[in-house]
Amino acid sequence: MSEDQQQPVPVGSEDDGVAIPRKRRREPEADPQATRRGVMLLIPLVTVGALIVAFVLTGMKDNAIYSKPVDQLVAQKARFIGRPVRAEGNLVHGTLEKRDTPCEYRFTITKNGVDVPVRYAQCVVPDTFRDVPGMDVGVTVEGALLADNSFEATSVLAKCPSKYEMKERAGRGESMPHAALQ
């Protein structure tokens, strides 16, 4: 009898005498050509995937913007000079000034006793960026740290005072000044 022929296999109890034929399966033999084709297809796919990952990581490294508090930025100055960076700190009261010629803002930010003078060569700053006596104004500047520890900003972000500080000020009859700087 050949392997493809059916053989009766008893099912159920031995007394019922019913047999259901069962077909035997032949195990497929491994085709060396198919295996080789699969490997030959897999190698270029893995290579292309690795190249894509390498390009993405390389591109991200060159365009990365580091964000540091000003004290850490100055402490690691050599690493960040001339690179795009974000610096975080608080506005030093009394240092915010607007110049008309050339149109720019100058101010100083501080963190843990380290002060960094900032030059922002734009005519407009966010509405929330005001020197409010008795209130710390958190500032994030984006731009480049210069060799003299000053900062050339390309954007300025002022953190809004907390709603609790605003409620406290409102309770004393004060309001957030939104008047233009003089």
Image (cartoon, rainbow, N blue to C red):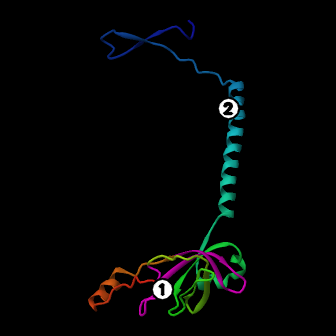
Residue at 33% across, 9% down? 17
Q: In this view, does 135 lie to the left or right of 92?
A: left
Q: Is residue 125 above or below residue 36?
A: below
Q: How far apart are marks 2 and 1 (CA)?
A: 71 Å
100 or 110, nearer to the observer: 100
Residue at 68% across, 58% down? 59
Residue 52's x, y, as percent? 67, 49
Checking the image for residue 42, the label placed there is none
Q: In which quarter of the image is residue 118?
A: bottom right
Residue 92's x, y, as percent? 52, 91
Residue 82's x, y, as percent? 71, 75
**What is the magenta range?**
128-156
Q: Does the magenta stretch include residue 155?
A: yes
Residue at 69% across, 43% down? 48
Q: Helix, strand, or loop for circle 1?
A: loop
Q: Does the magenta stretch include residue 147?
A: yes
Give the farthest residue toward the front.
101
Checking the image for residue 38, the label placed there is 2
Q: In this view, does 145 lie above or below 136?
A: above
Q: Is disc 2 surrounded by few (<14), some (14 to 19) or many (20+) residues within 10 Å?
A: few
Q: Is disc 1 surrounded by few (<14), some (14 to 19) or many (20+) residues within 10 Å?
A: few
Label 1 near label 2: C-beta < 8 Å?
no
Disc 1 designates what residue?
A: 181
Q: Earlier in the sequence, mark 2 or mark 1?
A: 2
The amino acid pointed to by label 1 is Leu
The amino acid pointed to by label 2 is Gly
Quadrant of the rendering where the N terminus is positioned:
top right
Q: Is residue 83 left or right of residue 114?
A: right
Residue at 50% across, 92% down? 93
164 or 151, nearer to the observer: 151
